[in-house]
């Protein structure tokens, strides 16, 4: 289990990195935290000819509070998000999920941008950013563009990134007042990828009527599965158990596409999605009501 | 697969000693530590980042040395199990593992010791649950973790007593 | 010689911290992969992708031409040196009509691969990286063959054949009986029939296997570092294989990162190959198994299917049991019948059962070879009997603890002879025990009464599914043939001890030291144990079958007693006092009541090995003795496990709230070490119950060959375990010990099943398979609900 040979570059500016990426295109892989890429290289499932290590570029790791949300640099380590007061205050859904992601030694290396660019449908960050309606700044020598999370994840390990692009940062909007959130997962072991999971956000008006809801599932499709119809169904309703049950039923029966693997059948995943969706909405509602 | 002959000059500090080596970029940090500079205390159990036996500290933070290329440690400081204490002068964490029987075959132990050493710096008075979380990225096939958890809690006490 | 007085021990039985720890804790312990030799080359194996295929063509020329490659060998290149390994265990000679077709693995496959991961070629290069690059350049063409993936289908008439020279895939067949089961079933009030399925897992020691071999052409001597549990048999086998004198082959099993059984398999292909390469190339060669290889090439265990019938009286007394089962041996059967015999020996549990019949068939399949792994067939037997007891309790309307109590062997019934043979072909006799006491202790410790009467109803009223499980198990341990030890008082006053067994974390450097220190009157830290180096001890079999503490331990005790006698004899002469008046403590022999008249062991050791003068005729120089211990049959340990666990019936996620183990393994050498063994065993057992399963597809391809997908229990899954000790001494050996190495793992899957059925009391279902997982449990609960 030793990686195949590759050509290594460790640029110290983003411009240099983009220039190398333009030069090598599909032959190159960007090395961020390496916590998904290096195992694949050790198994020789991935054999990139060129590796562009962006760990030496300063100023790509930051968590900044801004008007309406948080700006997160691509090379922000999970561990930084885990202990960030800014993240706690402005993106509590992400903050509270961090300790669940992998293990301490992986969180010290794994990065925000790396996890998003890898686009594992079982990973939390793609789902959470989709739930929070985050957007990502993709840069290349050709320029830059902002892509919303809902248009970024295109399929299994597939994103809107062009071969010459790097995800440089993300902007995560803050939830409005009287909003609640929840992530519910079923994991074989506490820190495993989930068999199924769902992130929910709800925003209530002063009468506890749902103004906005977003339900996004993980591990039950080839990407974060935004249950748009179920989310819409909840709008304008009080979040009674009947309303929640109906949304969970709709989402889990029609808006996800789970597959079979050795850990779970599609049926079981669908069942879990339903159960977890109800729990997530319930917890999100309680959190929202707990706010002034 | 094309063989590339690229070699890179690496300068890294390990356990306070500066090492300079010319290496292939694909050399894993675990292999560099074990086979290039002879620090075989760091063990390799899975080479895909799950078992944690190869955990070392980079700039005082625990990392999987099998998931890093050695060239990535350029200019950084690495601490391995050999840097924690000696047979005659065990570190408080090592001493606690000895007293609490926190090891059996000893293979996973170095990765746990480095991880726990870093953990207790940030959380000097952990609960049992926090201790279990701290070592959740380290697999052990011998102990069932109970004596390891005991050892982590004992180490915390020892460190506090030592001030 | 009198047995060691139970109540008068100074060192044995104490919670002594381990001598080996400082080395292990500071990264100074040498494991096989730490061996670094000048000029060492590195091997990588080229393995079969297919589980069953004919090799049509093999072209290694590109690999040979790759820069940095020293050599590539195929079976053709090995020529006459490529022949199968020796059989490890022969078929039982004492049983009539036994079928046994011995088929063993080869170093390199020539014509037909029989499981995915079999070695076809080996690349030797300057680095492991280069060796793996070159292995990727080997061109091979296969003709895929129909695959034998299922053990029941394997024995059907139209099954493809794993070994073409046999008529079927039947590797072995054996029947054992006791009493008259047919008569018993006729007199039964109730007959219960069930089928149970147990699937494969892997031992997953944290250290993978590895071999380093060094050939010294000038002295024609070979040194091999091997992650083996059995260094002496490896030495003997290698010498025979390579045509060398045993004295010219040294096998060292240094610190080993966990064994758990598979590291006593021999000979692995790589074990035959790497020493041969070192000689052929006249360079040291290292091969270290990586984790992916470990999932394919290191032996596995647990696949069995049981068809069981039990006969009961109305009041729950067992009249008899019939258990026919199929055992999966994988592509070869080098380890003989050990595992299925162990299953047979445990299928009656700790119960007084007069009538028994069991036939097993061993099937070849296109899967990795099966050899014993921690538990070694025992968990299967215990699973079968304890599941049947639970089912009987329900059908007969008897409390599940009560039905067990009514059938456990009574304390006055020992030694209890079963009249069948065990894994070592010795008679299955339970030497001693107090099974009722262990049950009582466990019920008390877990608070059974209170839980069932008060706590559980409260949980249920709250809508929570919290269940309790309690069940007993036995573990046959400490089998022969023998082990030996040499104890020497060195001129520095320290005690040097050598034995042939290997050590893989069991604390031998401490527990053995305690045994010796007890006799030789020194501090435990002054006893230095050498294990697993054929240059230090010439005889032995290995560490397996929970036998280290029993067999090597008693050899150690015997040698230490002999040395003690020599010490007293010489001291008596030197101090001019009768032996009866001498005391030995803290490394000093003194005359009782005359403290100034004394001599240290250090000085005595010098006197015992004089540079001038004469050693008296009929005596030997030195304070040294070698002794051997070989039991006629092994002692049987006993225990009871209990668990309280909660399950979320919507997600099938579990949380274990309490776990109690009462372990009775005779005289305890070191409770600290014993508890560690039990904890680790339970962790594996829990894996075998709910986390660990090797998933093979219909082509016998393993689908979860990584730690991402094969789930070892982690620190956040393990409950705290409350270990209680009972000590029913074994009358079979002087220390009174029984083994404990595998105990923890044995009853857990059965206990887990019982607990889940109790927790999900409002669902009507029955668990008849292990390992489970949340998905499977969900299906089982649903299936039964809808039928």
Image (cartoon, rainbow, N blue to C red):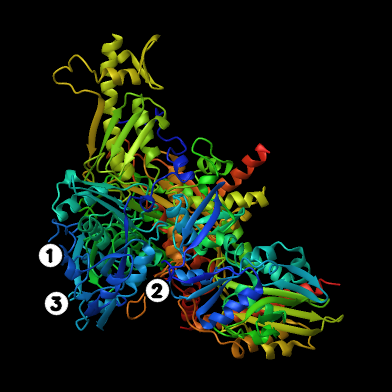
Image label count = 3
Percent position of residue C632, x then y = 21, 44
Image quarter in which the N terminus of chain C is found: top left
Q: Secondary structure at mark 3?
A: loop
The residue sitting at 48% across, 78% down in the picture is: C779
Same chain for mark 1 and mark 2? The answer is: yes
Q: Earlier in the sequence, mark 2 or mark 3?
A: 3
Q: Is residue A52 left or right of residue A67?
A: left
Q: Badge 1 is on which residue? A: C80
The residue sitting at 29% across, 29% down in the picture is: C488
Q: Is residue C401 visible?
A: no
Proximity of marks 2 and 3: CB atoms separated by less than 8 Å: no
Q: Residue C695 — which label? A: 2
Q: Residue C167 — which label? A: 3
Determine the chain carrying the residue at label 2.
C
Determine the chain carrying the residue at label 1.
C
């Amino acid at each position: 289990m030793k990686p195949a040979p590759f050509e290594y570059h460790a640029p110290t500016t983003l411009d240099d990195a983009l220039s190398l990426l333009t030069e090598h295109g599909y032959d190159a892989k960007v090395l961020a935290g390496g916590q998904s890429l290096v195992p694949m290289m050790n198994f020789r499932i991935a054999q990139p000819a060129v590796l562009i290590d962006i760990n030496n570029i300063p100023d790509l790791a930051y968590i900044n509070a801004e008007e309406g949300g948080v700006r997160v640099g691509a090379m922000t380590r999970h561990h930084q998000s885990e202990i960030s007061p800014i993240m706690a205050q402005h993106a509590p859904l992400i903050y509270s999920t961090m300790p669940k992601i992998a293990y301490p030694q992986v969180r010290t290396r794994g990065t925000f941008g790396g996890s998003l660019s890898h686009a594992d449908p079982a990973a939390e960050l793609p789902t959470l950013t989709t739930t929070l309606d985050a957007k990502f700044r993709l840069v290349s020598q050709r320029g830059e563009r902002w892509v919303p999370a809902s248009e970024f994840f295109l399929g299994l390990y597939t994103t809107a990134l062009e071969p010459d692009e790097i995800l440089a940062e993300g902007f995560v909007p803050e939830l409005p007042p009287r909003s609640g959130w929840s992530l519910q997962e079923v994991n074989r072991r506490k820190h495993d990828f989930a068999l199924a999971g769902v992130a929910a956000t709800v925003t209530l008006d002063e009468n506890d009527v749902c103004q906005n809801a977003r339900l996004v599932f993980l591990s039950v499709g080839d990407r974060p599965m935004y249950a748009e119809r179920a989310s819409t169904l909840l709008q304008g309703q009080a979040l009674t158990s009947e309303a929640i049950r109906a949304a969970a039923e709709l989402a889990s029966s029609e808006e996800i596409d789970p597959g079979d693997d050795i850990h779970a059948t599609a049926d079981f995943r669908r069942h879990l999605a339903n159960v977890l969706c109800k729990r997530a909405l319930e917890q999100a509602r309680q959190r929202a009501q707990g706010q002034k | 697969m094309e063989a590339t002959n690229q070699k890179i000059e690496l300068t890294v500090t390990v356990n306070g000693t500066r090492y300079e080596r010319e290496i292939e970029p694909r050399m894993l940090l675990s292999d560099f530590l074990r086979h290039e500079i002879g620090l075989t205390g760091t063990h390799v159990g899975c080479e895909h980042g799950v078992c944690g036996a190869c955990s070392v500290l980079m700039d005082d933070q625990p990392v999987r040395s099998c998931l890093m290329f050695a060239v990535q440690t350029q200019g950084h400081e690495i601490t391995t199990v050999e840097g924690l204490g000696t047979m005659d002068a065990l570190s408080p964490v090592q001493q606690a593992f000895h007293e609490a029987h926190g090891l059996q075959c000893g293979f996973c132990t170095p990765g746990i010791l480095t991880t726990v050493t870093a953990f207790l710096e940030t959380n000097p008075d952990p609960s049992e649950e926090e201790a279990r979380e701290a070592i959740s990225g380290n697999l052990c096939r011998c102990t069932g973790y109970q004596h390891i958890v005991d050892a982590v809690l004992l180490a915390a006490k020892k460190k506090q007593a030592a001030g | 010689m009198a047995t060691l007085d139970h109540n008068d021990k100074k060192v044995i039985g104490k919670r002594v911290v381990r001598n080996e720890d400082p080395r292990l804790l500071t990264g100074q312990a040498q494991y096989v992969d730490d061996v670094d030799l000048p000029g060492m080359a590195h091997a990588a194996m080229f393995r079969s992708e297919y589980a069953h295929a004919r090799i049509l063509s093999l072209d290694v020329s590109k690999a040979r031409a790759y820069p940095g490659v020293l050599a590539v060998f195929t079976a053709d290149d090995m020529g006459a040196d490529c022949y199968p390994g020796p059989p490890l265990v022969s078929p039982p000679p004492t049983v009539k009509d036994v079928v046994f077709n011995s088929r063993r693995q080869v170093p390199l496959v020539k014509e037909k691969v029989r499981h995915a991961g079999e070695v076809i070629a080996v690349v030797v290069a300057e680095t492991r990286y280069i060796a793996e690059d070159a292995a990727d350049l080997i061109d091979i063409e296969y003709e895929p063959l129909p695959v034998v993936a299922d053990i029941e289908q394997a024995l059907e008439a139209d099954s493809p054949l794993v070994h073409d020279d046999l008529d079927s895939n039947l590797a072995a067949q054996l029947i054992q009986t006791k009493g008259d089961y047919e008569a018993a079933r006729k007199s039964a009030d109730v007959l219960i029939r069930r089928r149970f399925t147990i699937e494969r897992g892997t031992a997953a020691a944290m250290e993978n296997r590895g071999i380093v071999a060094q050939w010294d052409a000038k002295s024609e001597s070979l040194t091999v570092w091997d992650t083996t549990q059995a260094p002496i048999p490896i030495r003997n086998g290698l010498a025979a294989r390579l045509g060398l004198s045993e004295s010219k082959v040294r096998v060292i099993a240094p610190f080993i990162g966990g064994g758990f059984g598979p590291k006593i398999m021999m000979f692995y292909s790589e074990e035959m190959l790497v020493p041969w390469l070192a000689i052929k190339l006249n360079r040291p060669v290292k091969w270290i198994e990586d984790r992916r290889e470990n999932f394919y090439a290191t032996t596995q265990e647990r696949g069995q299917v049981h068809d069981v019938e039990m006969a009961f009286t109305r009041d729950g007394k067992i009249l008899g049991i019939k258990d026919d089962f199929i055992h999966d041996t994988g592509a070869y059967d080098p380890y003989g019948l050990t595992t299925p015999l162990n299953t047979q020996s445990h299928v009656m549990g700790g119960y007084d059962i007069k009538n028994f019949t069991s036939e097993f068939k061993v099937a070849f399949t296109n899967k990795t070879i099966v050899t014993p792994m921690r538990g070694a067939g025992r968990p299967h037997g215990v699973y079968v009997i304890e599941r049947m007891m639970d089912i009987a309790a329900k059908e007969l309307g008897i409390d599940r603890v009560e039905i067990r109590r009514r059938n456990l062997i009574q304390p006055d019934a020992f030694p209890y002879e079963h009249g069948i043979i065990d894994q070592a072909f010795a008679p299955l006799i339970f030497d001693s025990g107090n099974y009722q006491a262990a049950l009582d202790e466990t019920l008390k410790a877990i608070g059974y009464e209170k839980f069932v009467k008060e706590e559980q109803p409260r949980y249920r009223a709250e809508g929570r599914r919290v269940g309790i499980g309690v069940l007993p198990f036995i573990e046959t341990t400490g089998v022969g043939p023998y082990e030996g030890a040499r104890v020497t008082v060195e001129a520095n006053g320290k005690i040097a001890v050598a034995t042939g067994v290997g050590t893989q974390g069991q604390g031998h450097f401490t527990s053995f030291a305690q045994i010796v220190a007890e006799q030789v009157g020194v501090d435990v830290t002054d006893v230095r144990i050498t294990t697993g180096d054929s240059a230090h001890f010439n005889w032995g079999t290995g560490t397996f079958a929970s036998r280290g503490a029993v067999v090597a331990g008693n050899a150690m005790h015997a040698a230490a007693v002999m040395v003690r006698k020599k010490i007293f004899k010489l001291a008596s002469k030197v101090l001019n006092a009768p032996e009866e008046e001498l005391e030995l403590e803290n490394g000093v022999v003194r005359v009782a009541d005359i403290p100034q008249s004394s001599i240290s062991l250090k000085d005595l050791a010098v006197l015992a090995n004089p540079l001038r003068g004469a050693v008296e005729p009929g005596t030997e120089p030195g304070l040294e003795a070698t002794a051997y211990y070989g039991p006629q049959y092994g002692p049987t340990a006993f225990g009871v496990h209990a668990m309280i666990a909660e399950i979320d019936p919507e997600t099938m996620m579990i949380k274990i709230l309490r776990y109690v183990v009462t372990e009775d393994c005779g005289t305890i050498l070191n409770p600290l070490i014993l508890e560690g063994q039990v904890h680790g065993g339970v962790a594996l057992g829990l894996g075998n119950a709910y986390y660990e399963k090797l998933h093979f597809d219909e082509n016998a391809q393993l689908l979860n060959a990584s730690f991402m997908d094969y789930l070892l229990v982690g620190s956040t899954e393990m409950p705290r375990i409350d270990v209680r000790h009972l000590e029913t001494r074994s009358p079979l050996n002087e220390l009174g010990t029984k083994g404990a190495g595998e105990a923890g793992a044995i009853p857990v899957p059965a206990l887990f099943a019982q607990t889940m059925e109790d927790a999900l009391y409002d669902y009507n279902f029955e668990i008849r398979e292990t390992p489970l997982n949340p998905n499977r449990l969900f299906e089982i609960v649903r299936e039964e609900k809808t039928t």
